[in-house]
Amino acid sequence: MQTVKEYVQRWYQSGLAPDEYICHGKHGNLVEIEHAKDGTRQTVLTFCTNDVLGLVQDQAVKEATINAIHRYGASNSSCSVLSGRIDLHRELEEEISAFKKLPHTQLFLNAWMATQALTDAFCHLAIPVPGFEHTKETLIMTDVLNHGCIMSAVVNAGTRSGKVFGHSPKVRVKAYRHCDTEDLARKLKRYARPDDRILVVTDTVFSMDGDIAPLPEMIEVLSHYQDSVLFLDEAHASGAIGATGHGIFEHYQMTPQDAIDRGVNPLVMTTFSKFAASAGAAISSHVPEIIPLLNVSPTSIGTISLPPPMTAAALESIRQVKHKPQLVQKLQYNTRYLRSRLLEEGFEAIGETNVIPVLLPSDINPKHFGRTLLADHDIWVSPIWFVAKPRLRITANALHTEAEMEQLVSAMVKTRDLAYQPVISA
């Protein structure tokens, strides 16, 4: 443990450790937080929540959650494949399948476990089956800026349970440049072999850059590799993009069937922690045979199924999105408004979604900028200082008012001006 102690001490000394806050309650976008360092409390206006549609505090969602607890209790106390499957799971899976236009869906506790389950199920199948020999290698192509849950799953795809506990063909993993379909095509041509099973993995909205994957071009590239698989992580897309919030296919005015018709198999991951006021994830497909493999993957069979209150919250949230398209419209209006105002004031706001990264000049520390916003203006944003281009990660949501967004922009202008205020000698 000495190495751990020395590392963490140096970590704190270097200023890399994040500031920590504890939430005591919220009303709309006003949050009462406690500064973990000294215990002081403060009510702040938040622009760092992923509750994009404001459904976490929706009355119908809260009532559905409470009713599920009364009916089923707080947990299912077993994995889905044994005794942990309840009828709410089936309802949620059917609702997601309709939402994503893919008929077969499997639930997971979170996106990390879902992604790991996918690589295990797809690359290594499950247990040895008499009379079936698994001989084909898998080539995985991943965007270099994919989320950590994707990167963790794909880089370990060659050593997951199917490889450890039984014979399984090799898995090769290659990265392609961010949203660069020409580079994807070049690398597929370079690395793909005639008998490979091909899996391309991408976020649809990237969590740190706020941009959108070029889906039509990706399908065009993959159409030259028949029976290839395209895995789409919709964590920041569901409820946020597309005319009614259905995600990337709707954003491009397409459907999954368009990919299927071109020989590409779409797999769509829906997560509930952003738009659906809950936690958990699901993978949807038009291929029914993938579901039993996902159901017995280590991250599914080795843990409890999605607890009733979380299932009910996600289910009611998706129904709210279907019946209240104005929530999505308000989110998209706020996204356009806030992004345009930041650009008008000279900030470098990149991306095109409600995730609005603001790149600061290299001589301004995002963490110090965020602290000033909090201390002087009661505004809470997420400073990101440990990536290649440090930034403020601002998130708009459907509950923000124009007045609140103007409050943020004004505070950011004042904080920027303060950072460049000349020092006057005595």
Image (cartoon, rainbow, N blue to C red):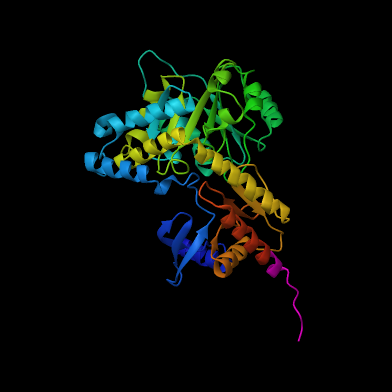
Q: In this view of the protein, which residue sits in the foreground, 244 or 248? A: 244
* Residue furthest top in the image: 131
Q: In this view of the protein, which residue sits in the foreground, 208 or 278? A: 278
Viewport quadrant of the N terminus = bottom left
Q: Is residue 66 above or below residue 212?
A: below
Residue 116: x %, y % from top left = 45, 36
> Is residue 425 on the magenta stretch?
yes
Residue 91: x %, y % from top left = 34, 29
Tell me if 320 is positioned left or right of 415 in this view. left
Q: Tell me which segment is drawn in magenta.
A: 416-426
**SS assignment for the magenta stretch, majority:** loop
Q: Is residue 392 above or below residue 295?
A: below
Viewport quadrant of the C terminus = bottom right
Q: Is residue 11 above or below residue 84?
A: below
Q: Is residue 296 visible?
A: no
Q: Is residue 108 visible?
A: yes
Q: In this view of the protein, which residue sits in the foreground, 144 or 254? A: 254
> Is residue 35 on the magenta stretch?
no
Residue 101: x %, y % from top left = 48, 24
